[in-house]
């Protein structure tokens, strides 16, 4: 295990894409201390900002308010990143494997364009969770993101595969231009959920305000809800699926595209 | 001063084919031995020496490529980045490189002169501003005329003499080097959602003007004005299956005149629709070989991602519908337009595979290397920095066979490439990437290692990997200055801009002003680009023919 | 209004539709006025995207936007029958809830309308040479705005590097303002940050930002006493010909002199490769 403790707040954002399990697993303690971060335009050593304990491990634990530290766990494919405090933007962006857990909040672009692996945020997350970067046609392609708290706008924008679970309320444009994958909203969302979606599934456990271009197409208990519930149960979260408890109102759209996406809204009996 | 000794020199302009020669450089030019008695000596023993590359057809500056840059941030992020230093600006490569990176990338593969092939007069000021931000290479630009409303109106009324004066006036107003014609009549019609596909049918809105007479008249005007580069023609029906008939018909309209056919690959298809599309390079090359009045550039395609940009608006809308991806469109008032669509050429796609083969076939079937030039119509067929991959395909029939193995099985009978054994020699390559295009552009001081020519020269390490060799020259020298050495950028001098001033009747201003005020939305005096706005302008001769 | 070959009667041959949340002065100039409920632009545009493709939309859903289904059906019919449609949009669309997605909705509608007839859309940019800045940033960096150079090459991410977000989060330790007055328009946290860090303003006038700034340098007003180029909102460059002389230096001169002074200082860049094959 490698432990990094933030010893001073950066004056301007600190870019720390080198702090990933893939990279640190190959480095001795001295090498980690000497690794390069960008503090604004200047290159600095890791030990200017962090107290470093441990070496040669793909389990990393970070302590402190890291809300100005960006790109942690970027492109990671293995190991674990545990953050005891808040994390900055682009946490786990383009990751393909491994696990990130944050006992605090995460910034914007959490898991941006990720391909695999797991992310669990105990607090809130910022905007564009699991989204495509500007101009890209595809966002998240796999893996899962669990946020216990609220999530910001454009969550899951252009996502193609994978799972996003928001425990708290989501802001506008959840699943914007979504191409596939699943988004679960435990506390619902603000407006424009599923706008311009092509495919994929958005599930809400509370009532949702839908776009005018979605059409109601029946109430049912899809088999996959059962399967998903099983998967989610293993990850410690519940999804109702039993007919005796209720059913899902199904809306399809977005007709503006025209798309074949679906929004399922749980209606307890 | 600089001496380059012991290298094998390929200088087709002076019929030097691989002989070991020493080159002497002073004040940016090649000089004789006596005039170069000091300075650095490059021992080029065992190395290969070419004149600096000349790109006859590329899109590197102006409103359209700049629109393409805005549309493709995802590509900028995945491409190589040039880091700034105290003296060098940063930049990004990729499908639509930034201006500074364009200079680094061209010079990095031994190109020292580029011709921006599509400039609307209305935004010429913008193009020149961008060109001045492209370092190292020398530049020229071609102005779009074949859809200009005032010019078409004069043709309609049969006022050919006046049309000639107006063309000359426009050329000077744009501070351009030559004339480009894109989809004659078709871009004008596109403003109303139409196209012009038949050479002898009137363009919508006109009774007498047809695409055929637009090209014939323009070619005549260009010859009469003595513009060094002939009409630079993007034919009608670009990219459409069966368009070879349009292309051949256009060539017949231009018999007896000089003409340069741009990106011929896109105009060389047989078949009736996408399902039956095939390469028509054999019949096209046969006609072309028999008519020495014409030159062409390949417009070759390589598989991979790119962004297509062309003044051919209707074609781009079609491509947008085919791809369902991004689409940008610009209309330039009375003059022209432009469409932009990111595109991926895939070997598994039959149409793309035919396009890939057609470009190579044209380069291999046209037998005179002085008349067919290297181009991908950057960025349409592929990005210019991928030229070395095409050179490898031209030099190795075995490598072509290897690549053809990836094509779909049903491509048989649609292409001729498997039957072609020709392999380019270094001498022929030096002709198609440098000496030939320089001659077609009328730039006598380029593509030439003779005494008095500009000292633009590339030195390659011999390498069995042709793409590697041409992609990474050992030295690139521009105007006598070493700009690239061992893959590193050494210097980034400003390049020149070549322009011409054809003579025109001084009364042309008075003729144009009222028309202009009626039709344009900017004031007449703001329209021409001021000479002070051109960085390093070099006026080239433009002598009217008698 | 301009007469042309295809529209010989000028204004009479054109139809102008105005969409706004209230009756503005422009209503008089328009043939048709559609009053949309505030915050419903994105929904209205998305409904139109569905309607041009003949997708069924219920009356109740349309009524939410404040515009009737009949009015929209009429609009779609007119749009499809037009020879050349042009849409212009401004900050009422791009700066209200939904922001860039509202603009995206309009641009997508314009693109999709080309399946039926010629259609274009163009943003009505703000004051000053906004388009010029946008055009030049694009050719020099590949990106229009929201660019960071901290790694020695341009990176783009609106929301992360765009001015308002950088200032609101306090991500800079110095601010250089030219041709803008963020102190007058930006949210309070951004203004607080401008006052907190060294802010340098170049402007012909004393602005709200100048009052927050550590340094204000008075410059010659562009177009009046400083020459240059301005890009019109359709990206056509126009030369600026100054009518007056000014004793103040131009923005360009001041910026160049600051740059020269910075270049004389020791460089902070560490020697490294000339190019990166993979970016951050």
Image: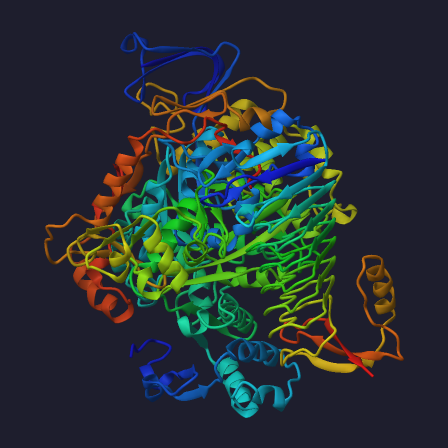
The picture places residue B465, in percent across and down from the top left corner, at 63, 24
Split into 4 quadrants, where in the image is the N terminus of chain B?
Answer: top left
In the shown orientation, is residue C242 left or right of residue B262? left
Quarter-of-image position of residue C211: bottom left
In the shown orientation, is residue A19 left or right of residue C21? right
The picture places residue B415, in percent across and down from the top left corner, at 69, 44
Count of marks, rendered view = 0
Front residue of A80/C84: it is A80
What residue appears at the point 32 percent right and 76 percent down from the top-left corner? C4
The picture places residue A163, in percent across and down from the top left corner, at 74, 59
Front residue of A100/B522: it is A100
Q: How is the image coloured?
A: rainbow
Quarter-of-image position of residue A158: bottom right
In the shown orientation, is residue B387 left or right of residue C232? right
A60 to C42, vertically: above or below: above
Q: Is residue B120 visible?
A: no
What residue appears at the point 57 percent right and 72 percent down from the top-left corner? C115
A227 to B60, vertically: above or below: below
Split into 4 quadrants, where in the image is the C terminus of chain B?
Answer: top left
In the shown orientation, is residue A44 left or right of residue C225? right
A46 to B214, vertically: above or below: above
The picture places residue A144, in percent across and down from the top left corner, at 74, 55
Q: Is residue C133 visible?
A: yes
C249 to A259, vertically: above or below: above
């Amino acid at each position: 295990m490698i432990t990094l403790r933030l010893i001073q707040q950066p004056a301007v954002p600190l870019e720390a894409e080198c702090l990933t399990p893939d990279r640190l697993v190959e480095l001795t303690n001295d090498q980690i201390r000497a690794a390069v971060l960008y503090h604004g335009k200047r290159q600095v050593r890791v030990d200017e900002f962090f107290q470093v304990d441990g070496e040669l491990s793909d389990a990393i634990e970070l302590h402190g308010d890291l809300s100005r530290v960006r790109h942690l766990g970027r492109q990671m494919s293995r190991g674990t990143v545990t953050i005891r405090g808040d994390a900055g933007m682009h946490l786990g962006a383009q990751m393909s494997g491994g696990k990130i857990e944050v006992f605090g909040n995460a910034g914007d672009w959490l898991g941006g364009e990720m391909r695999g692996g797991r992310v669990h945020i105990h607090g809130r997350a910022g905007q564009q969770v699991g989204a495509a970067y500007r101009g890209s046609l595809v966002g998240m392609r796999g893996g899962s993101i669990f946020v216990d708290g609220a999530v910001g706008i454009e969550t899951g924008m252009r996502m193609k595969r994978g799972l996003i679970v928001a425990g708290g309320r989501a802001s506008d444009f959840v699943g914007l231009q979504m191409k596939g994958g699943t988004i679960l909203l435990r506390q619902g969302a603000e407006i424009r959920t599923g706008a311009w979606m092509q495919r994929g599934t958005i599930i809400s456990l509370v009532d949702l305000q839908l776009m005018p271009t979605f059409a109601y197409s029946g109430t049912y208990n899809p088999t996959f809800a059962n399967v998903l519930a099983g998967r989610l149960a293993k990850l410690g979260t519940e999804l109702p699926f039993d007919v005796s408890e209720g059913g899902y109102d199904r809306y399809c759209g977005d007709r503006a595209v025209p798309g074949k996406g679906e929004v399922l809204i749980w209606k307890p009996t | 001063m600089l001496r380059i000794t012991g290298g094998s020199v390929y200088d087709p302009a002076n019929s030097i084919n691989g002989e070991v020669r020493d080159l002497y450089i002073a004040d940016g030019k090649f000089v004789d031995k006596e005039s170069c008695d000091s300075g650095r000596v490059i021992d080029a023993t065992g190395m290969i020496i070419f004149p600096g590359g000349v790109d006859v057809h590329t899109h590197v500056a102006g409103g359209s490529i700049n629109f393409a840059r805005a549309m493709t941030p995802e590509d900028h992020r995945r491409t190589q980045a040039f880091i700034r230093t105290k003296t060098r600006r940063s930049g990004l490569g990729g499908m639509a490189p930034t201006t500074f990176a364009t200079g680094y990338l061209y010079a990095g593969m031994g190109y020292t002169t580029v011709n921006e092939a599509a400039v609307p007069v209305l935004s010429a000021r913008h193009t020149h501003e961008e060109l001045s931000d492209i370092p190292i290479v020398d530049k020229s630009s071609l102005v779009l005329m074949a859809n200009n409303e005032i010019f078409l109106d004069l043709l309609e009324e049969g006022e050919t003499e006046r049309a000639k004066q107006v063309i000359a006036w426009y050329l000077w107003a744009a501070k351009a080097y030559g004339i480009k014609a894109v989809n004659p009549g078709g871009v004008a019609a596109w403003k109303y959602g139409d196209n012009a596909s038949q050479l002898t049918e009137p363009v919508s809105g006109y009774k007498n003007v047809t695409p055929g007479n637009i090209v014939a008249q323009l070619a005549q005007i260009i010859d009469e004005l003595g513009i060094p580069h002939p009409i630079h023609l993007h034919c009608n029906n670009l990219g459409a299956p069966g368009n070879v008939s349009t292309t051949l018909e256009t060539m017949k309209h231009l018999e007896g005149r000089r003409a340069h056919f741009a990106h011929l690959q896109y105009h060389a298809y047989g078949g009736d629709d996408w399902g039956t599309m095939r390469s028509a390079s054999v019949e096209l090359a046969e006609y072309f070989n028999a008519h020495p009045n014409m030159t062409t550039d390949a417009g070759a395609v390589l598989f991979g991602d790119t962004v297509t940009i062309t003044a051919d608006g209707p074609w781009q809308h079609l491509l947008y519908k085919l791809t369902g991806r991004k689409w940008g469109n610009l209309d330039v008032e009375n003059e022209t337009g432009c469409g932009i669509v990111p595109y991926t050429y895939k070997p598994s796609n039959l149409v793309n595979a035919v396009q890939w083969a057609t470009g190579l076939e044209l380069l291999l079937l046209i037998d005179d290397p002085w008349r067919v030039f290297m181009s991908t119509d950057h960025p349409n067929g592929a990005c210019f920095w991928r030229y070395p991959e095409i050179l490898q395909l031209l030099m190795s029939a075995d490598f072509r066979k290897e690549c053809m193995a990836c094509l779909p099985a049903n491509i048989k009978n649609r292409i001729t490439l498997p039957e072609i054994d020709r392999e380019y020699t270094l001498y022929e390559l030096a002709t198609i990437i440098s000496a030939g295009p320089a001659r077609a552009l009328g730039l006598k001081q380029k593509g030439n290692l003779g005494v008095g020519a500009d000292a633009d020269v590339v030195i390659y390490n011999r390498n069995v990997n042709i793409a590697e060799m041409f992609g990474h020259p050992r030295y690139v020298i521009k105007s006598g200055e070493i700009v690239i050495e061992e893959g590193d950028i050494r210097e980034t001098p400003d390049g020149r801009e070549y322009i011409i001033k054809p003579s025109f009747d001084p009364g042309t201003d008075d003729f144009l002003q009222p028309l202009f005020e009626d039709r344009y939305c900017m004031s007449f005096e703001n329209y021409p680009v001021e000479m002070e706005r051109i960085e390093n302008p070099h006026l080239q001769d433009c002598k009217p023919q008698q | 209004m301009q007469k042309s070959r295809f529209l010989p009667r000028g204004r009479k041959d054109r139809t102008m539709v105005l969409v706004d949340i209230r009756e503005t002065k422009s209503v008089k100039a328009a043939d048709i006025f559609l009053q949309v409920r505030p915050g419903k632009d994105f929904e209205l545009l998305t409904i139109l995207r569905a309607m041009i493709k003949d997708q069924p939309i219920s009356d109740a859903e349309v009524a939410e936007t404040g515009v009737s289904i009949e009015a929209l059906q009429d609009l779609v019919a007119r749009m499809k029958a037009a020879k050349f449609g042009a849409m212009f949009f401004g900050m009422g669309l791009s700066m209200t809830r939904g922001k860039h997605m509202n603009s995206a909705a309009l641009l997508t509608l314009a693109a999709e309308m080309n399946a039926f007839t010629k259609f274009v859309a163009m943003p009505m940019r703000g004051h000053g040479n906004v388009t010029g800045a946008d055009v030049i940033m694009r050719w020099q960096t590949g990106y229009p705005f929201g660019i960071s150079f901290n790694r020695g090459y341009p990176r783009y991410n609106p929301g992360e590097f765009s001015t308002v977000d950088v200032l609101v989060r306090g991500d800079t330790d110095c601010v250089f303002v030219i041709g803008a007055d963020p102190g007058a328009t930006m949210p309070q946290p951004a203004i607080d940050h401008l006052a907190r860090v060294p802010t340098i303003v170049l402007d012909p006038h004393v602005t709200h930002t100048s009052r927050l700034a550590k340094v204000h340098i008075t410059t010659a007003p562009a177009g009046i006493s400083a020459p240059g180029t301005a890009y019109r909102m359709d990206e056509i460059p126009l030369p600026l010909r100054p009518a007056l002389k000014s004793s103040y230096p131009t923005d360009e001169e001041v910026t160049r002199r600051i740059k020269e002074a910075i270049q004389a200082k020791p460089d902070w860049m560490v020697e490294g490769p000339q190019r990166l094959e993979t970016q951050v």
